[in-house]
Amino acid sequence: MPLPSDDLIHNPDGGLPRLRAIMACLRDPATGCPWDLEQDFASIAPYTIEEAYEVADAIERQAWDDLRGELGDLLFQSVFHAQMAEEAGYFDLNDVIRSISDKMVARHPHVFGSESRDKSADQQTADWEALKAQERGKARALDGVALGLPALMRAVKLQKRAARVGFDWPSTDQVVAKIAEEAAELVEARDTLTQAEVTEEFGDLLFVMANLARHLHVDPEAALRAANAKFTRRFQRIEDWLAEDGRTPDQSGLAEMDALWDRAKAEEKAGKAQQG
């Protein structure tokens, strides 16, 4: 296959054909980039996941210029995988685009077909899930939940699938009671069992926490990201205040830093009150 022309490669308005051409050149066995040529699906997959998180991070920060770049990085990952698939004779980017286009048309009969659009968002979600179930055919209830998902996200998806067939607690009270039970088992494991058993009990507790998030309509990944950001902000304020005294956290003590943490917490609350 001949290499794309330099005119396309260097055309800033070349769009998707330009990106495909760049990828083809990077993977050319004779003149391509040695690093790109060494990669395969497995080696690139972690970068794909990382880029998806960086998209989410830009959205969380409302950094729209950054989002433009991160979406480009994520698009490049799709093009990279499609290029490797084409080289292996599996499919090409046109097949990928056709597949997702066909899926979107099929799953939106209220937009592209004869069904009425006069439905609530909840009903449309239920219809979407019903169509997905039809596509899966006679698969088991938990089949198709990707193994590579972040663990908390996968836990929620598994629980949603089980709930569709009636395997679910009817109220949050029962979930909270289960959390208390699992926490007690974790403490017991810490005191009497092996590290492997402690790890297992900790996993059980996290799994039920994810279930509580689902019952409360909370995205646990988003909630934990927000908690991480809050911890970072408050700890950096501790560092700032210690720096004013010419010290670093390792030159302080837990009692002092805990008091500064409370100060940072109060500062944030006061700031929110002023904004409100």
Image (tube, rainbow, N blue to C red):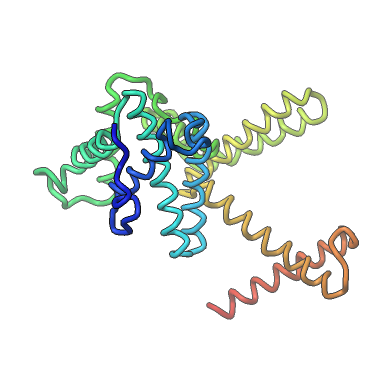
| Residue 189, x across and y down, in percent | 76, 28
Question: What residue do we see at 49% from left, 49% from top?
Answer: 218
Q: Can residue 154 be seen in this view?
A: no
Going by the image, does 157 lie left or right of 185?
Answer: left
Question: What residue do we see at 62% from left, 76% from top?
Answer: 271
| Residue 64, x across and y down, in percent | 44, 64
Question: What residue do we see at 46% from left, 33% from top?
Answer: 159
| Residue 156, x across and y down, in percent | 48, 38
* Front in this rendered view, residue 250 or 276: 250
Residue at the left extreme of this rendering: 114
Q: In which quarter of the image is the N terminus?
A: top left
Question: What residue do we see at 43% from left, 36% from top?
Answer: 31
Vertically, is 134 above or below 9?
A: above
Q: Is residue 1 visible?
A: yes
* Front in this rendered view, residue 189 or 74: 74
Going by the image, does 163 lie left or right of 203?
Answer: left
In this rendering, the count of numbered labels is 0
Going by the image, does 82 lie left or right of 123?
Answer: right
Vertically, is 247 above or below 9?
A: below
On the image, which quarter does residue 197 sit in? top right
* Front in this rendered view, residue 165 or 76: 76
Residue at the bottom extreme of this rendering: 274
| Residue 95, x across and y down, in percent | 25, 33
